[in-house]
Amino acid sequence: MRRVPLSRLEDTRSNGYCAVQFTHVLKQFLVQYRYPNIPINQIDKWARFVVLPFSLLPVWHKLKFVNTELFSKKTLDSFSAHPSSSKRSNKSIKPSRFNTVLVRLKQGNDWTKDMRVGRVRVIFSLPSDKLDTLVPSDIPPPQHLTYIEWFTKFVAHPEPYSGLYRVRRDVGADGLYTASIIALDSIVCSAHLFPQWGGSVPPEWTNIPIRVSTLPNRRLKCSDFDMSTFTKRKPEVPYIFKREPYFKTHWTMLKCPACFTSRMALDNEALKVIRLEAQMKRLQEDCATKEFDLRQTQKAIEDFKMRMQDWEQQDQDLKEHEIALKERELSLYQREVLLWESKADLARRERQDADALYERWKRTRDYHITAIESEKRMRAEIKDERKRLEEYEKEVVRREKKNAKKLEEFNDLHSLEAHRIIAAATG
């Protein structure tokens, strides 16, 4: 991964990516992703107001297809998208390579209607720290994207002699190649195209196999191409098998213009034999594919049986757990019943204690009332007794005064008598 300026992505020189419409197409992609219901004729108008908050993008130069579950770390397919690199002396040490791929546009059973060939120019991703300003935060875009230059859609029937489907570069009204930005996971596999030059072979083309994906734009002198179906990396069974030697030989032969010309000059019988052999190989491929699908189905059935056993075990464990829960719930209910009974017994005892306490209080109250009444009677009797005692004391005092008076009178009389006697005696 490397960070590449946007200007270099649109640069058409040898060290550029030749994605001449990259900025405009990226703005269109952002508008469509942010507003999916916008009319198609309004996308360009809205895209003019989009401002990209970055000048560098993380870019990858190669993508490999692997299946670690079936083939470990072995690379099953790959495609590249990188410009040529050179030393300081401007001597090229690595030619540019922009492979063609097969892209799935929709789900279906007919790959000629559901897929389309495109040329990968840039494999990139949007900066994560800038996404908030470009798309809604709750709907993030795909992590990896690719800039694709399209070829035309597949026709209904292949070419009668070669049995291959012919495509050509899709050019818009402005003379530029039609391009789009798509999610990287919509790419099914790599695609090999055979150039159809129409006439004499260009002198710079030799018998060395030439791939259209390795040629820069200025050297694409062909307008029509045939897509190879002689490889096992077909849309029906992608990334599963290698190419067999027979198909590998014919695939290499068809890439060579001279050999392809000689093949077109074969008589009808030889062509029929080749077609029958190709059909036989296709049938073998289909059988191998069906065998692989059968093995996969058997494996899936075994996995499903194992999962069923696991589910049954889990169901049994769940039932046991439910039984244990019910038993625990029953014990809790019994404990709750005992608790309520103990509470009722306690309440009954408390009621009895309260009644006994009330009776005791009532007896105590009656006793207190009786004691108070007795005390009142005794106080009244004591009061009456005190009154009688006071009257008696008064009577005693009165009698004592009376007796004292009588005694005084007696003493007076006695003293007079004594004086009289004394006087008589002396007299």
Image: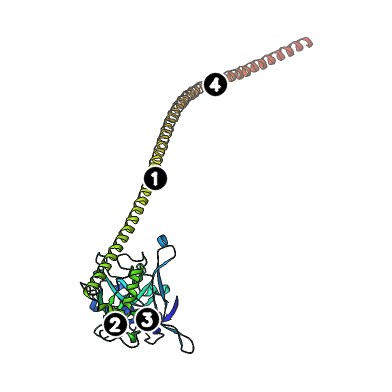
Q: Which amino acid, mark 1? A: Gln
Task: Identify the residue position indicated by label 1 in the image.
Answer: 314
Cβ–Cβ below 8 Å for labels 4 and 2?
A: no
Task: Identify the residue position indicated by label 3 in the image.
Answer: 208
How crowded pointer 4 is (Cα within 10 Å; few <14, some 14-19, many 20+) is rated as few
Q: Which amino acid, mark 4? A: Ile
Cβ–Cβ below 8 Å for labels 2 and 3?
A: no
| Whether residue 174 is situated above or below residue 295 in the rendered picture | below
Element at badge 1? Answer: helix
Q: Alpha-carbon distance for marks 2 and 1?
A: 58 Å
Task: Identify the residue position indicated by label 4 in the image.
Answer: 382
User: Residue 166 is drawn in which quadrant?
Assistant: bottom left
Q: Alpha-carbon distance for marks 1 and 3?
A: 63 Å
Residue plotted at (25% across, 69% down)? 273
Q: Nearer the viewer, mark 3 or mark 4?
A: 3
Q: Position of residue 269 (x, y in %)?
A: 22, 72
Residue plotted at (66% across, 16% down)? 409
Element at badge 4? Answer: helix
Q: Is residue 410 left or right of residue 210?
A: right
Task: Identify the residue position indicated by label 2 in the image.
Answer: 177
How crowded pointer 2 is (Cα within 10 Å; few <14, some 14-19, many 20+) is rated as some
Q: Residue furthest bottom?
A: 89
Q: Nearer the viewer, residue 420 or 30?
A: 30
Cβ–Cβ below 8 Å for labels 1 and 3?
A: no
